[in-house]
Amino acid sequence: MDPVRTCIGCRMRAERSSLLRVVARESELVVDETASLPGRGAWLHPTVACFDRAVKRKAFGRALRVTMALDTRTLENRLNG
């Protein structure tokens, strides 16, 4: 059984394998493909809708426990294709 995590965008629980893990590196959000980068991570469905909800709710900063503004362009570009 795969571990369950909560998406910070829609707040729905899902299996870890169906979510993206993101971490804050310097002031940028980085996708952690292997879920092995050090530091606190946040989980997100790989959809633009969940990304937009997370940005609107300011969930990235809260989930990653950072107070600085995070650059979300890299993650947004990845999700948009």
Image (spheres, rainbow, N blue to C red):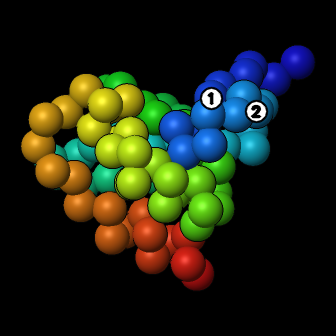
Q: Is 74 placed above or below 4 here?
A: below
Residue annotated with mark 2: 14
Outermost residue to the right: 1
The quadrant in which residue 6 appears is top right
Q: Residues within 10 Å of mark 2 (few under 14, many from 20)?
A: some
Q: Residues within 10 Å of mark 1 (few under 14, many from 20)?
A: some
Residue drawn 25% across the image and 27% down it = 65
In the rendered structure, the answer to whether residue 39 lies left or right of residue 48 reads: left
Judging depth in this view, the residue of 66 and 57 nearest the camera is 57
The quadrant in which residue 2 appears is top right
In the rendered image, residue 52, in percent from the top left (x then y), is placed at 49, 61
Let me know if residue 56 appears in the view.
yes
Q: Is 65 placed above or below 54 here?
A: above
**Distance between the alpha carbons at the discs numbered 2 and 1:** 6 Å
Residue drawn 65% across the image and 26% down it = 5
Q: Earlier in the sequence, mark 2 or mark 1?
A: 1
Q: Is 69 placed above or below 66 here?
A: below
Residue annotated with mark 1: 6
In the rendered structure, the answer to whether residue 14 lies left or right of residue 53 reads: right
**What label sits on residue 32 in the rendered view?**
none
User: Which quadrant: the C terminus?
Assistant: bottom right
Outermost residue to the bottom: 81
In the rendered image, residue 28, in percent from the top left (x then y), is placed at 24, 55
Q: Amino acid at mark 1?
A: Thr
In the rendered image, residue 60, in percent from the top left (x then y), is placed at 36, 42
Q: Are marks 2 and 1 in contact (CB under 8 Å)?
A: yes
User: Which quadrant: the N terminus?
Assistant: top right
In the rendered structure, the answer to whether residue 18 lies left or right of residue 76 reads: right
In the rendered image, residue 9, in percent from the top left (x then y), is placed at 54, 45
Q: Is 80 placed above or below 4 here?
A: below
In the rendered structure, the answer to whether residue 50 lies left or right of residue 26 reads: right
